[in-house]
């Protein structure tokens, strides 16, 4: 029974390795569709050459990683595929054309790390030890490869290679921030017209929301702008908001109420921002919650092959009896059999 439980736990850990890392949303996030066209694959390779050829080399592709100790070599490659721009959504194409797609390779418990890449805009193998590649419009309908070598530093610690592929929204000159909701583009303007932030549709900058915040970033007031006219929100705590024209005293009704509320609902819905209650908006929160359009992460974990010797004179250690837990060697063999190459499909997070 204990062996079965151990195997089940190991399987859960292995499947967790292949799960894509996804970005968090606002306090009240909107639902987002799945996006599966960007492809990221991370595969372990042998450290000895063989006659089995993979793209750009003569090393075996391994079905799994292996236990390591200090001084051992690890070898892997990353493959990403960027579809043609006609097969991508408008937000992805827009950000990639702006140079805001990124592939990043990171390592843990490895030294003397060497990386090289080929593909996309780079037609020949080129040293790229920083592990970063910017995806641009020249990479549409292209495949990009990274090859990684490294030496294990510590024996009693796992060695890890992680590849992250993402497309991101970014602040421009610390003053504007573009983001998408579906195919609709919006812009956040900072410190304009006495507001801390103004959010408008890219197609209509005469209408939008103005956010006024405390020093902590907590929103203390929101006004709605419709075709240049400003409306103050009232009585929205715990109920439907009402809107009073700037300089006026009576809430609007009828078509005016419908149209002003539509601006509020559209922009708050696009941001996933809850305009009622204790909400916050800051530069960092905007990047955290609207910055990631798509992001996927894959990792290869080379488990530590170091086994702590048991002190037979230690009265607190009792050797297992017949039928008890599997031996340490048995556990290592289970780990070796289960740890596999990580491959993920990048999913849509937020536009």
Image: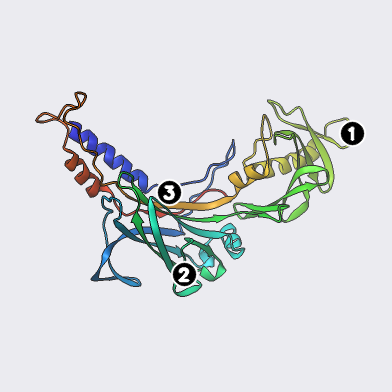
Label 1 and label 2: CA atoms lie apart by 58 Å
Label 3 or label 1, whichever lies nearer to me, is: 3
Task: First in sequence, mark 2 or 3: give its number.
Answer: 3
Q: Secondary structure at mark 3?
A: loop
The part of the image, by quadrant, that contains residue 264 is top right
- Above or below, 206 against 219 in this view is below
Residue pointed to by mark 2: 142
Label 2 and label 3: CA atoms lie apart by 22 Å
- Above or below, 178 against 278 in this view is below
Task: First in sequence, mark 1 or 2: give its number.
Answer: 2
* Residue 312 image offset from top left, x and y in percent: 16, 30
Direction right: furthest residue: 247
Residue shown at 79% from the left, 42% from the top: 195
Please say whether residue 120 is visible from this viewpoint.
yes
| Label pair 3/1, CB-CB below 8 angstroms | no
Residue shown at 20% from the left, 34% from the top: 310
Label 1 or label 2, whichever lies nearer to me, is: 2
Nearer to me, 125 or 23: 125
* Residue 45 image offset from top left, x and y in percent: 30, 62
Left or right: 23 in relation to 143: right
Nearer to me, 323 or 272: 323
- Above or below, 141 against 105 in this view is below
Characterize the local packing of mark 3: few (<14), some (14-19) or many (20 or more) Cα atoms within 10 angstroms.
some
Q: Secondary structure at mark 1?
A: loop
Residue pointed to by mark 3: 20
Residue pointed to by mark 1: 248
The part of the image, by quadrant, that contains residue 257 is top right
Residue shown at 19% from the left, 39% from the top: 328
Q: Secondary structure at mark 2?
A: strand
């Amino acid at each position: 029974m204990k062996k079965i439980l151990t195997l089940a736990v190991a399987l859960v850990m292995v499947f967790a390795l292949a799960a894509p890392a996804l970005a968090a949303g606002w306090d009240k996030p909107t639902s987002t569709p799945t996006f599966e066209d960007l492809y990221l694959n991370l595969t372990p390779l042998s450290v000895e050459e063989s006659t089995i050829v993979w793209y750009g080399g003569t090393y075996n592709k391994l079905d799994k990683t292996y236990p390591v100790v200090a001084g051992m070599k690890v070898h892997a490659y990353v493959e990403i595929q960027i579809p043609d721009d006609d097969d991508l959504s408008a937000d992805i194409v827009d950000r990639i054309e702006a140079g805001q797609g990124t592939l990043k390779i990171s390592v843990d418990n490895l030294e003397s790390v060497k990386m090289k890449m080929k593909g996309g805009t780079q037609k020949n193998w080129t040293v790229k030890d920083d592990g970063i590649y910017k995806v641009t419009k020249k990479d549409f309908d292209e495949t990009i490869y990274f090859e990684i070598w490294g030496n294990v530093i510590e024996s009693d610690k796992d060695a890890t290679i992680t590849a992250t592929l993402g497309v991101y929204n970014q602040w421009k000159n610390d003053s504007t921030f573009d983001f998408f909701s579906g195919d609709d583009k919006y812009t956040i303007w900072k410190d304009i017209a006495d507001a801390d932030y103004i959010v408008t549709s890219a197609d209509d900058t005469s209408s939008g929301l103005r956010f006024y915040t405390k020093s902590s970033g907590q929103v203390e007031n929101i006004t709605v702008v419709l075709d240049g006219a400003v409306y103050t929100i009232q009585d929205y705590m715990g109920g439907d908001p009402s809107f009073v024209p700037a300089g006026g005293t009576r809430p609007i009704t009828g078509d005016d109420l419908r149209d002003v509320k539509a601006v509020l609902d559209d922009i708050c819905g696009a941001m996933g921002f809850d305009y009622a209650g204790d909400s916050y908006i800051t530069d960092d929160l905007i990047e955290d919650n609207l910055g990631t359009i798509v992001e996927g992460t894959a990792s290869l974990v080379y488990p530590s092959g170091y086994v702590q010797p048991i002190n037979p004179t230690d009265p607190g250690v009792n050797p297992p009896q017949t039928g008890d837990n599997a031996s340490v060697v048995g556990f290592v063999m289970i780990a070796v059999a289960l740890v596999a190459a990580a491959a993920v499909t990048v999913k849509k997070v937020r536009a």
